[in-house]
Structure formats: C-alpha cells, structure tokens
Amino acid sequence: HGDVLSQQVARFLVKEVQRLRGGGKAAEGVASYLAGAPLEPQRLDSYAGQHKRLFTILAHRARRLACKLEARFVALTKPGASFEQTMNLCAVLAWKATAAHSFYVMALNNYEALNTLVEDAAVKASLLRLCELTLVQHVHENGSEFVDVLSDVQFDLIHERIDELLDEIRPDAVALVDAFG
C-alpha cells in the first residue's frame, strides 16, 4: 500500500511541476512550496526556535527534488512509453522526492496543529521542543540533501541545537511518554 501511495505522490509531483513550468497557476495548500524561489545559503548564528526557517529549508529540499524528478522524468520519456514505465526508470529519485514532500507536509501539519489545538502552555512548549528536535534531527540525518543551503558551520549549529534540545526535553520525557498514551 505504501508503494502505491508513494507512486501517486510522485505522479502528483511530476504533474504539478510540469503544470508550473507550463505557466499554470501556482498550487495552493500544502503543495504551494513548489512555486517558491530557490533558497540562498543560510547564515544563522543559532537554530534555537527557528521553526519557520527549518520549514523553509525543508520546503526548498522538497521543491528541488520534485523539480529534479520532473526533469529526469522528461529526459527519460520515450515515445509510446506509459507514465508508469517512465516513472519506473527514475524510481529512486521518485522515492526521494516523495519522502521529502511527505516529511515536509506532515511536519508542517504537526506544527500547525500544535499551535492551534494545544491550549496548555507548558504542554505546547514541550511538544514544540519535540517538534523542533524532529526537524533539526531530520536535517542532520539527511545532510547531503541540504549542502546547497547549509555549510559545515550551519550543520555544526544544527548539531548543537540537537544537543540543546535533548537537554531541554530530558526533564519532560516521562510526561511526553505518558501524553502519547
């Protein structure tokens, strides 16, 4: 089931980028990032509390991979070949683009839900720290996909933020586990 869903997301990404390249109206909602401009290299002094900047970085990666997928798909398209046959020729890139899109959308939805649905300030703060940890850890673990916008210095700052967040979250660990049932 996951493969089918991943293929459908990859199909959506290719078609959406083609539509945008053809002069179509920019997507709305969670796919609106596809119409964004390339991101300049980051020069922060700290990633503490930089949720929006992290989402911008994640959107940049998702957009870049979706555009790479569409370009590769077009380059591999042969007369008479079906969409699926061509997609199979770039399956690894399709999977990466789908994973980047899915992580960005799910993380953004989580962040927005925490900010709108969690009323208790202490619980919200704890869950936002956990969300931020997820974001910086994801960037750290997928570093090669961010080298166009994050230097070694920026990666060091992200690693420092991971350490800081782990220290901040440790006292909340039992309450967080209990909150998840």
Image (cartoon, grey):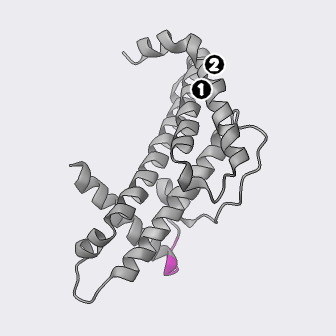
Residue 18 or residue 91, whichever sits in front: 91
Q: Which residue is located at x 32 percent, y 82 percent?
A: 77
Q: In the drawing, what numbered circle is on residue 168? A: 2
Residue 177 x, y percent position in the rendering = 43, 15
Q: Is the C-beta separation of discs 1 and 2 under 8 Å?
A: yes
Q: Is residue 124 left or right of residue 91?
A: right
- Residue denoted by label 1: 129
**Callout 1: SS:** helix
Q: Which residue is located at x 31 percent, y 64 percent?
A: 91
**Callout 2: SS:** helix
Q: Is residue 147 left or right of residue 76?
A: right
Q: Which residues are magenta?
A: 21-25
Q: Which residue is located at x 49 percent, y 69 percent?
A: 67
Give the answer, above or below, for where 179 lies relative to 151.
Answer: above
Is residue 67 among what the camera can see? Answer: yes
Residue 107 x, y percent position in the rendering = 49, 41
Comparing labels 1 and 2, the label whose residue is closer to the camera: 2
> Looking at numbered disc 1 in the image, what kind of residue is underneath it?
Arg
Residue 93 x, y percent position in the rendering = 39, 63
Give the answer, above or below, for where 175 lies relative to 37.
Answer: above
Q: In the drawing, what numbered circle is on residue 55? A: none
Confirm whether the magenta stretch covers residue 73.
no
Give the answer, above or below, for where 37 lies relative to 110.
Answer: below
Q: CA distance from mark 1 to mark 2?
A: 8 Å
- Toward which corner of the image does residue 169 lie, by quadrant? top right
Q: How many marks?
A: 2
Which callout, 1 or 2, points at the residue further toward the start of the chain? 1
Q: Is residue 34 left or right of residue 72?
A: right
Q: How busy is the neighbourhood of tag 2: few (under 14 within 10 Å), some, or many (20 plus)? A: some
Residue 131 x, y percent position in the rendering = 54, 31
Q: Which residue is located at x 57 percent, y 15 percent?
A: 170
Outermost residue, bottom side:
79
